[in-house]
Image (cartoon, grey):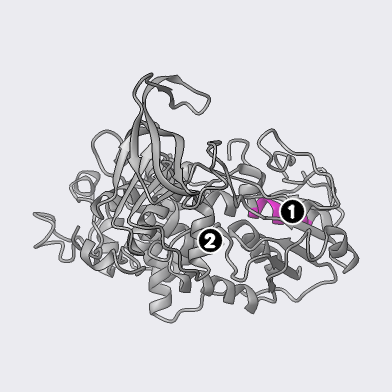
Amino acid sequence: MVHCGDPETVCGAYTTYEDEEMNAKERMAIARQMPVELTVAERITNFDEIVAGYSEETAVLEANRCLQCKKPGCRDGCPINNNIPAFIALLRERQFEEAYWKVRETSSLPAVCSRVCPHEFQCEGSCVRGKGKGQAVAIGMLERFLVDWMVANDRNLMKECRLPGDKKVAIVGSGPAGMTVAYYLAHKGIPCTIFESLSQHGGMLSVGIPAFRLPRNIINAEFEALKSCGVTLKTGVTIGRDKSLEDLRAEGFDAVFMGVGAHASRKLGLDGEATTEGVMHGVDYLRRINLGEMIDLGKKVVVVGGGNVAIDVARTALRLGSSDVFILYRRSKAEMPASMAEVHHLEEEGVRIEMLAAPVKIHQKNGKLTAVECVRMELGEPDASGRRRPVVQEGSNFMIEAHSLIPAISQNVDHTADNGHTFNLTNWGTYDTDPLTLQTSVEWIFAGGDDVLGPQTAAKAVYQGKVAAESIECYLKGQDLMSDREFLCKLDN
């Protein structure tokens, strides 16, 4: 893809309208602006960010595609409920700083969400311009432009924080939910300490997403902003092992937020999965690589799954020297939950996807993986997820030679932090919280993000962080958790 830089010479007959109001027909005539991307040859040997941000002219041109709908579906499609039409209207008037702060009214992590959210399933998926054969407004790219513009122009990104009061909160986990709780409480004058079990902060943002999708300086900048507002960050401390939740209570923390995420790999259930050399699970592989470990998967790598973790594993393995990488997915491409932009990049880079196929047996010699036996699938009736259920085609077994097998079929919640406490849990092993306030069965403990929702998007974790922060503030003030609220958890979030 190329950059649409000069609207008159590159984008066809469209002429810029700087000094006059455009009508809907003129807006509809503007094609979606495509960003500059690194070529395949440039990107497959490194972890540099692939997609460049918009220039000012391109951002304004893209913003002019917005129809400013009276009933904006984009806002309903955003888990955080960002006022998308309002920030786009400011952007196209070149009021970039004002547009940035309009986003910050509702989002604690716009630099992150604008880069990693699957926009085609959220805001852009609800954009009226994307219905039928049209292309949605590039809402994610416009949000990213505002953040990048603020940084490039050395504008202040920090809101004034209140002086700290006498109540304090412990946050277990430094992912997007925990970061958001800390952001909102610190700005209300409630000191927070984040306890992160890993050596790096950021949770799955840092150890589950490769740097070519989310540069580490973006994550670090968010934590610098938190620290400037008085948030204390402690890495390498595992709650439930190094200290208990009761220890936090004894240390004077008046409430606790559980944002431990979902870092435990879900297993395929095949014989030899845990003992065969060459079998490693997706989030474990990404975590080890992102923490600086070098892992040689060999030339032939088979990844199982159709979500973003599977895509990230395959693309990471390719960059680290595995030349024959492909994905097994048991449904068709239309059912893949991964971002289609990431799937497109994956295929550009030469990773094959074997649709309607699933592993059924691990073959090994002297304890080392040699091949994966698979079966063909066909799609039956829809299951509880609404997607058609994959059904095995009898007698369709086939073999794939492989040096590594990386299942990436979802994650579960690790409950190490629970030691010493009994929480009500759902059938999925997530925390069973009040559906509106996110209070757990332990009165002074709240939870949100993937450990409540299961593996979900950063934006949904951010929204639950906002809800939990407000609930914690009410709890610390001795107020009813349901009264006088700005945020309540969406029942379908």
What residue sits right under mark 1 in the picture?
A: 416
Between residue 121 and residue 314, name the one nearer to us: 314
- Tell whether 489 sits left or right of 455: right
The residue furthest right is 250
Dividing the picture into quarters, in which one does residue 115 lie?
Answer: bottom left
Within 10 Å of the Cα at label 1, are there few (<14), some (14-19), or many (20+) other Cα atoms?
A: few
Residue 168, given in percent of the width and then of the height, sits at 81, 67
Residue under the image location 41 percent in, 58 percent down: 297
- Tell whether 98 sits left or right of 176: left
- On the rendered image, what quadrant is the C terminus found in? top right
- Tell whether 205 sits left or right of 145: right
- Tell whether 242 sits left or right of 126: right
What residue sits right under mark 2 in the picture?
A: 287
Q: Which numbered disc, 1 or 2, marks the residue that appears first in the sequence?
A: 2
Q: Which residues are magenta?
A: 465-473
CA separation in Å, label 1 and label 2: 18 Å
Residue under the image location 72 percent in, 62 percent down: 171
Residue under the image location 55 percent in, 57 percent down: 106
As helix, strand or loop, the secondary structure at mark 2 comes to: helix
- On the rendered image, what quadrant is the N terminus found in? bottom left
The residue furthest bottom is 154
Between residue 270 and residue 245, name the one nearer to us: 270
Between residue 345 and residue 193, name the one nearer to us: 345
Q: Is residue 11 above or below residue 28?
A: below
Q: Is residue 272 above or below residue 63?
A: above
Residue 27, given in percent of the width and then of the height, sits at 23, 49
Q: Amino acid at mark 1?
A: Thr
Residue 42 within the magenta-colored segment of the rendering: no
